[in-house]
């Protein structure tokens, strides 16, 4: 299908954006990377009267350390996440996730802010920011807010963003020497949306798990924090018994819907497989091979 007739304007600053929003109201749609928006326009799932290009707004760019937090501007592209040295050093889960997102052309244009705002339940980055305990920083003409990532995703393609509000940045607690993180997914082909995926972040207390956040994607209406599975790992050495306990707890954590990939039980099976694959990567070689 072809796009509907639509206007275009570029905002060069946040004040410029607020002025355009005040003038056009709900008819104005923010355009950042556009990798989701352009598809929804083509299928007439979106019908804005004006696209507001925010890609030149400097306040939404940049990756920097601020104390114990890594601040990632909303316009940071997926490809930049994959190669940025600060991200690799202080939020390696995001660097590991970036190459899993779609295809190179998408990664070169898509942004972290756009991915989080769209909140696709099969997307990698929403699950990652929940697993990392990140904070979503918003901006609007009325001021900004700081929303814990775990409270940001409210339903299928729904977030806590209010009308006129945009994502300005993501703040991620920096990884420590005790942090272990990984992401794994199952997809039919490279670049396809995941049938199921798992982003995990563990804080180790010596040889034992101090805290664990296991967040699934592709198995619900948004990122799904498997709280009981994480609790089953706490205080335990990452051996086969600990893995089995986490897998067993998934029965209470997950209630996946059927979708184009298969029935709920297939999703549950994939979730158990993903737990084993992710946790095996954190085990000593001798234990993992046993």
Image (spheres, rainbow, N blue to C red):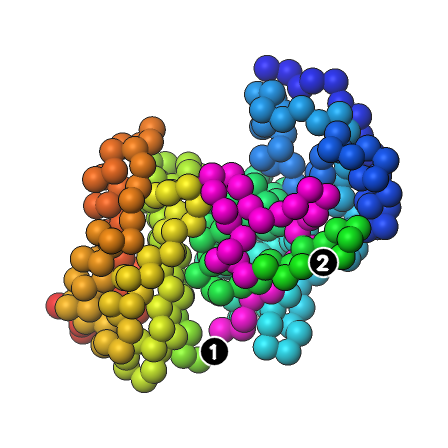
Report if residue 108 is visible in the image.
no
Which part of the image, by quadrant, shows the C terminus?
Answer: bottom left
Residue 15 in the image: state x and y as whole percent.
85, 50
- Does 97 sit left or right of 48 as displayed? left
> x and y percent of residue 120 in the render?
49, 40
Closer to viewer: mark 1 or mark 2? 2
Quarter of the image where one finds residue 174: bottom right
Report whether 214 appears left or right of 222.
left
In the orientation shown, which residue stands out farthest toward the bottom? Answer: 206
Residue 214 in view in this figure = yes
The magenta stretch spans residue 62: no
- Between 233 and 83, the one lying in front of the other is 233
Q: Secondary structure at mark 2?
A: loop
Residue underneath mark 2: 144
Report which residue position mark 1 lands on: 176
Magenta highlight range: 148-175
Residue at x 66% of width, y 41% of height:
33
Secondary structure beneath dot 1 equals: loop
Position of the N terminus, as image quadrant, is top right
């Amino acid at each position: 299908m072809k796009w509907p007739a639509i206007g275009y304007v570029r905002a060069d600053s946040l004040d410029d954006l607020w002025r355009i929003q005040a003038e056009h109201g709900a008819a104005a749609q923010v355009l950042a990377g556009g990798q989701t928006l352009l598809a929804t326009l083509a299928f007439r799932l979106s019908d804005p009267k004006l696209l507001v290009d925010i890609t030149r707004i400097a306040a939404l760019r940049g990756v920097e350390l601020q104390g114990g937090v890594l601040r990632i501007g909303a316009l940071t592209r997926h490809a930049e996440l994959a190669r940025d040295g600060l991200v690799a050093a202080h939020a390696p889960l995001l660097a590991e996730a970036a190459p899993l997102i779609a295809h190179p052309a998408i990664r070169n244009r898509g942004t972290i802010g756009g991915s989080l705002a769209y909140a696709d339940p099969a997307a990698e980055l929403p699950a990652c920011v929940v697993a990392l305990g990140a904070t979503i920083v918003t901006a609007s003409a009325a001021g900004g807010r700081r929303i814990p990532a775990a409270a940001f995703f409210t339903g299928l393609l729904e977030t806590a963003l209010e009308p006129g509000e945009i994502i300005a940045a993501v703040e991620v607690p920096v990884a420590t020497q005790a942090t272990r993180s990984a992401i794994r997914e199952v997809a039919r082909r490279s670049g396809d949306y995941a049938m199921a995926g798992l982003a995990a972040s563990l804080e180790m207390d010596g040889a034992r798990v101090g805290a664990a956040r296991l967040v699934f994607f592709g198995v619900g209406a948004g990122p799904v924090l498997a709280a009981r599975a994480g609790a089953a790992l706490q205080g335990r050495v990452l051996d086969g018994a600990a893995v089995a306990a986490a897998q067993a707890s998934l029965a209470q954590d997950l209630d996946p819907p059927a979708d184009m990939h298969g029935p709920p039980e297939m999703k549950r099976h994939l979730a158990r497989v993903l737990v084993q694959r992710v946790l095996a990567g954190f085990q000593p070689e001798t234990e993992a091979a046993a």
